[in-house]
Image: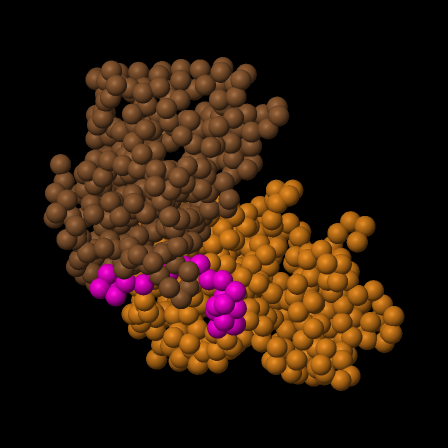
Amino acid sequence: MVNLKKLSKQPERLAPGHRMCIGCGVTIGIRQILRGTEKPVVIGNATGCLEVCTTIYPYTAWKVPWIHNAFENVGATMSGVQTAYEVLKKKGKIDKDIKFLAIGGDGGTYDIGLQSMSGMLERGHDVFYVCYDNEAYMNTGIQRSSATPYGASTKTAPAGKVKQGKERFKKDLTKIVVAHNIPYVCQAAIHNYSDTIKKAQKAFKTYGPTFMNLLTPCTAGWVYPAENTVEMSKLATETCFWPLYEIENGKYTLNYDPGDKKKPITDWLKTQRRFRHLFKPGNEKILQEIQEHVDSEWEKLKKLCSE
Amino acid sequence: MKKMKTKALTGADAAGTAMKQIDPDVVAAYPITPQTPVMHKFAKFIADGEVHTELIKVESEHSAMSASVGAASAGARVMTATAANGLALMVEIVYIAASLRLPIVMNVVNRALSAPINIHCDHSDSMLCRDSGWIQLYSENQQEVYDNTLLAVRLAENSKVKLPVMVCQDGFITSHEVMRVDLLEDKKVKDFIGKHKPDYPLLDTDNPVTYGPLDLFDYYFEHKRQQSEALTHVFETFNNLSKEYEKISGRKLNLIEPYKLKDAELAIICLNSSAGSVKFVVDQLREWGVKAGLLKIRMFRPFPKKLVVDALKHVKAFAVLDRSESFSLQGGPLFTEIRSTMYEIENKPKSVNYIYGLGGRELKLDHIRQVFEDLGKVAESNKFKIVRFLGVRNG
């Protein structure tokens, strides 16, 4: 367990007053992650909700050095920042121990920024990459991404008379990252601050590229009352839709197993308006497919974690 | 006396050697023909421990420029090189580099853009970036590649300028052909280049800054205005640096180079290696009594309007050679620039445009003679075709 009392004394690195939505899961998660190190940190942020809403000129909510370059290139941008650090340190121009954090949303990571992140991971830069996954292009007004779950209604894959939202299952980005054989990869969710902070601590402490896929519920895109954000995150793990696990030097560990208390996926789906159409008569098959998919992925993961 | 070493170098090697002597902190690059030998040369210097640079072998040109932006923001001295489609791929970030006022220096080995895919020289790649806010220097030969690259670092980092610089050379024609190049001693270059003093490095964690915030209708325009203001300081800064460079090298680098233009009646204007061929033809025509001249443009962005007007205003007719097509049907980018520049003067010379050399099509001496011959007719005529194609079937 992390010591909440101690953590609460750490200086806040993301100031209040930014313009993220009420009930946004992203800032909750990022504030947890920033508690993962007490060392100076330099942040790179891909275009997206977090970037747009925290830096409307002439204001900034960032109390640490921060750079936004473009949508698809936070991996490459931070490769440059971190390499500059290595060189300048070698030349004796910097003596501090600085940590590097790259942040992108699911659009900026699963989709348009995948190559840039992959390059950063493969080259072995000492950067902690956090993907805040809210399962669609929320900043541009809720369009489908490859992180959008099967059946979810978005503006570009809406539920209608003949279509029932997204027709493909969510891409398993965490596994793609695992395939890079980097020292530390994990999945986390914002309701479990203790788990998330512990993982951030590990990631910051590890030399080399590290990655966290962080589920961040979105009140605007998932459509639920703003006060339910933490509950949304919790249900995603209790239904095993979003398992909490980590891979340290290739070894899988399951961080949370509901065991017999595993809830049916509908418990999570029915709380969000983006899935409302799935509960109409005739869509039972889709609900069943989703449940089967969750079950089979969960079993596969449990197996990996028991090896 | 100046101590110099003369070497037989390709344009790519000249760029790589300049980079070695500059010894930047970070280089991020991706392979593309005909830029590759620049990076081969430089990578060998790294492998031999002759430079202290960290080379980021990125997975695309988009990432090359992205990493360059990151490293330059962090406070490093940064260089890169590319060509053609590679430059096209990075163009989004090329704009960002200039807008963030990052003094990155990039060697562009000019090559035609696709489609059809073609690896040979034309200027469609760098012309794609002409409005990106970068300073653009063009190089007639291998020596100029070397000189321009050294000067570019100082120009980019000047406190009044703080803008990235592209140093262009013709793919294969310059990049792969060997010429004698006078090199400065390493120490002289080091003293000339000086130390890099970044303004607001990201790595200064005690003084945190936010790079690249969202900037809306209330401030964006002012930032763009500042960017164009910065470009107004480029000419004077370049001239001052040129004087300083002349002292250590004996070579004078001008924004434009008029060649036998003072008393010329007919003139050609062009960029990069074609200037060498035109000089040869001008000399020949002069022997035959034709008052021919050349205006070579070294700096295309920002455009040294006053110098160009003064150099050209007395001629009867001039032809602008464009090694890229703008598809405006009003001529290539160099032509429209110069025509607009000449608009305000009275008794304008007559002017025509030749699109030539696309995809590496050779510019022959006969072509240049043909242009001067045409110009003779244009000078005497009131009706003539303005935009022409040179050296193409069914031209």
User: Residue B268: x and y, percent?
Assistant: 69, 70
Residue B206 painted magenta: yes
Nearer to us in this view, B84 or B231: B231
The picture quadrant where one finds residue A111 is top left
Give the residues in magenta: B204-228
User: Residue A184: x and y, percent?
Assistant: 24, 35
Q: Is residue B179 visible?
A: no
Q: Can residue B320 be seen in this view?
A: yes
The picture quadrant where one finds residue B289 is bottom right
Please report the residue visible at 78 percent of the width from the left and 75 percent of the height from the top: B350
Please report the residue visible at 41 percent of the width from the left and 26 percent of the height from the top: A269
User: Residue A64: x and y, percent?
Assistant: 27, 58
Nearer to us in this view, B69 or A234: A234
Q: The brown chain is which one?
A: A
User: Residue B11: x and y, percent?
Assistant: 48, 58
Please report the residue visible at 36 percent of the width from the left and 44 percent of the height from the top: A23
Q: In this view, does B309 lie to the left or right of A49?
A: right
Nearer to us in this view, B255 or A91: A91
The image shows a total of numbered marks equal to 0
Q: Quadrant of the C terminus of chain A?
A: top left
Q: Is residue A64 left or right of residue B224?
A: left
Q: In which quarter of the image is the N terminus of chain A?
A: top left
Nearer to us in this view, B245 or A233: A233
Position of residue B229 relative to residue A56, above or below, is below
- Name the tint of chain B in the rendering: orange
